[in-house]
Image: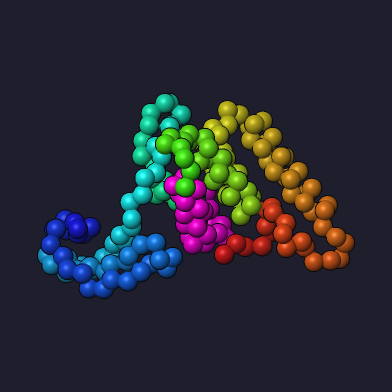
Amino acid sequence: MKCPRCGAVDDRVIDSRLAKDSSAIRRRRECLGCKKRFTTYERIEESLPFVIKKDGRREAFDRRKIIEGMRRACEKRPVSVDRIEAVADSIEQELMEGPEKEVSVQYIGERIMDELRQMDAVAYVRFASVYRSFRDIEEFITEIKELSGLKEARTERLPENGPPDENRQGIQDSPCS
């Protein structure tokens, strides 16, 4: 393993244990050159479909891109890193279990937007504005109106003075954890 600080390849494993979700092994390492400690994760490499980009190129699926895009959209929002990683895990699992050998980037983007729409409206709009490449302010306003209409429709279905329906899907007004 190459040290992230000095680039040396000699290190020793200090500690190994299962990661939180038991899908990876977490290893604490110490560089024998500079003595810096760092963490690595070892996962089973599963066959994931290739992603067909908008320009037709094909590239290997990379869950880090999902996490990075969602982190940018959720910056300064009440959405935890654990929740973002859970969405990435869910999408990755869905793709592993599916029969497709190739999947479009549009499908992945729509899945991310579905999850963000339910987690945080601001994060959803941020992601959608980049992902959908709105050509003008009118497209952006239309998207916000649709989002606002969905929220109002869900609010209207709530019983008066009663607790919200626990099975309700939608935008949450409370912070996500």
Q: Mark yes or no: residue 75 visible.
A: no
Which residues, given as a range, are shown in magenta?
73-96
Between 49 and 105, the one lying in front of the other is 49
Q: Position of residue 119 (x, y in %)?
A: 61, 55
Q: Position of residue 100 (x, y in %)?
A: 46, 37
Q: Residue at x 55, y 44 (%)?
A: 111
Residue at 33 percent across and 51 percent down: it is: 45
Q: Is residue 1 left or right of residue 164?
A: left
Q: Which x, y percent locates residue 78?
A: 57, 60
- When asked about the image quadrant of residue 162, the answer is bottom right
Count of marks placed on residues? 0
Task: Reply above or below: 9 against 37.
Answer: above
Residue sitting at the far right:
160
Q: Nearer the viewer, residue 118 or 7?
A: 118
Q: Residue at x 69, y 59 (%)?
A: 173
One can see residue 48 in this view: yes
Report whether 18 appears left or right of 70.
left
Task: Work out which residue is located at the far bottom of the displayed protein and give it.
Answer: 15
**Does the stretch in magenta take in 78?**
yes
Q: Compared with residue 43, is residue 98 higher up or lower down, i.e. above or below?
A: above
Q: Quadrant of the N terminus?
A: bottom left
